[in-house]
Image (cartoon, rainbow, N blue to C red):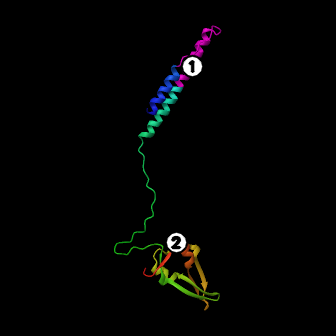
Amino acid sequence: MPRPLVALSLAAALALTPIPVRADTHSDSTQQHEAIGALLFGLTALAVIGAIASAQEDEKDQPRTHVPPATRHPPQARTGQRHVDRYALPLRCLNRIHTVHGTLRLFTRYCMERAYPPIHTLPRACYHEVRQTDGRMRFGWQPRCLQRMGYYGVRHH
């Protein structure tokens, strides 16, 4: 049975429920006031239930929009270009840097600017500046840090 019909039936039952009459201890005017109060209460209940049923009908009339869940799509390559995976890094940019503290490996910034177009997407937490043994500064990203962030190296980029 639809909700509005149940609500209407309940409201009608409440509004039409007889009120027990007491003995003649009350005057006629008191009984009339009680009857009017009961009638007003029943009509108010009927109005409230009708408003609720109407609001539910209005909700049903509104079209529901379905928003599909977000899916991760790889970036689309431009026409005539190969597909570029944002997480694939060119291994030719992985260089050994000799410092006073030893040798370390970096994806150097100079090479990455030319071989990896979305350089601005690389995590800043992995970016380092180091001084070589000859005093020159080198800039780049640590491979282990990048690997923890989901990046990986490929031979042909």
Residue furthest out toward the top: 24
Which residue lies at the image location 59% right of the left edge and 16% below the top edge? Answer: 34
Up the image or down, 94 lies above or below 68; here it is below
- Give above or below for 125 relative to 108: above
User: Which numbered dot is residue 38?
Assistant: 1
Q: Secondary structure at mark 2?
A: loop
- Was residue 35 drawn as part of the magenta stretch in this picture? yes
State how far apart marks 1 and 2 are (Cα): 72 Å
Label 1, residues with CA under 10 Å away: few <14, some 14-19, many ≥20: some
The segment highlighted magenta reads 17-44
What main secondary structure does the magenta stretch of the protein show?
helix
Q: Quadrant of residue 98?
A: bottom right
- Which mark, residue 150? 2
User: Whole-percent x and y of residue 105?
Assistant: 56, 84
Q: Which amino acid lies under the numbered mark 2 shown in the image of this protein?
A: Gly
- Mark 2 and mark 1 in contact (Cβ < 8 Å)? no
